Amino acid sequence: MKNSRMTDSAPVQRGEEMKLMKERLTRCLQLLKINHDERMRKTAFELIEKSNDFENRSQHWGWITALNAIAGSCLLNQRAFSQSEVYDFLTIAVTTSLEGRTKAIDELIFRVYRDVMATYESMDAKSKIAFPKIIVDVVAILGGGVDTSGKRTPIHNVEVYYQTRKSDVNSIISVTPSTTPVTTATAASIESIEEDMKVKKPTLSKDEESELVDILNKITERKKEDIKASIAKLERRDILRIKDLGKNYSKIQKYSKLIADTDNLQGFKTALQNESGRKLSSFQIQHAANSVRKAKLYLENVLDGKFIPHGSYGINHTKHNLEYGYLIVGLMESSRKRITSRRAGA
């Protein structure tokens, strides 16, 4: 009898939780002043109804779920927020989902606010459509240590996570109603940045393989036979990445010398900004310098298969952080740009 009552109460509890979730979603839509946008509203409520996040979640996660539904609706409806709307979205996410904030969290939130004010207007349409999703995941990590896909990220890596998601939004924006069920529309995560590269391994021509082996031989001082054997075991995405570093070997040498010649990285910063044509923050300069210093170690670990994936989404944080540094420096091409180039040549 006891078990029967417990079973009977489950649908009741689910209904109560769902009602509470819908109330939170309604409140968020009202605060954002988009509750009269029928298409956005309808899609967001459909996402809530399909969600399983109401089970065994804290109050913090309830607000995250509501905001995640709105972010998912932006993706599915290809709706880009204005700068003021995304600013409000961030404010609502922070005020509803973060309690007992530390100084470190407050400083990071401030940097995101500042970044929105400085860069949002110049973003392309895809980046703007994906931005609410990035905000939700960042706030979810700050509040509970995991993003909406379940990927755990320590606080000290959140800024890298944020910048990485911003630098490559193609996989987030690629989720569309015609190709993806509504239940998974908001499950895009940092892992999906890798997905577009998980296709058939490229076949290197003899000349390409020889050139890559020669460069890796110079950098790592390994035997060419050993390098060939290691390359044969790599996945497509890793082959593309070490090819990127290989073809930019002269830049690695140049940047390494600049980093070694100065304590304040001014020469390195000047060279980077001149070549990229854009200003870089102190955080980006420090991060890029760290990646350049570890280029040889990165290549060796890739060849040896030492970057063991962690968590359900198969991300190695050390590898991912180094690759973000190479993206900043331009030593690696983002998967977004790679896809664009591939489609242009198709």
Image (cartoon, grey):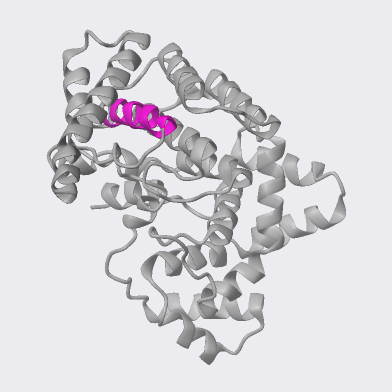
Q: Position of residue 282 (x, y in %)?
A: 72, 37
Query: Does 306 appear above or below 311?
Result: below
Rendered residue at 68%/34% (across/down) = 104
Q: In the depicted view, which residue is nearer to us: 204 or 88? A: 88
Please state if 307 lies on the left or on the right of 10 as rendered. right
Left or right: 28, with 241 as reference point: left
The stretch in magenta equals: 59-72
Most foreground residue, 221 or 215: 221
Examine the image and state in which quarter residue 36 appears.
top left
Name the dominant secondary structure of the magenta segment.
helix
Q: Residue at x 79, y 53 (%)?
A: 258
Question: Going 54% across and 64% down the picture, which residue do you hit?
Answer: 247
In reply to whether residue 231 is colored magenta, the answer given is no
Q: Can see residue 293?
A: yes
Q: Judge whether residue 66 is colored magenta.
A: yes
Residue at 45 percent across and 11 percent down: it is 84
Q: Position of residue 132 (x, y in %)?
A: 39, 28
Residue 47 visible in this rendered orientation of the protein: no
Please state which of residues 149 and 5 is positioned toward the viewer in this rendering.
5
Q: Determine whether, in the image, residue 222 is placed left or right of residue 332.
A: right
Residue 220, percent across and down? Answer: 65, 78
Count of marks overlaid on the render: 0
Position of 43 with respect to 339 (left or right) is left
Q: Position of residue 52 (x, y in %)?
A: 25, 41
Q: Quadrant of residue 180?
A: top left
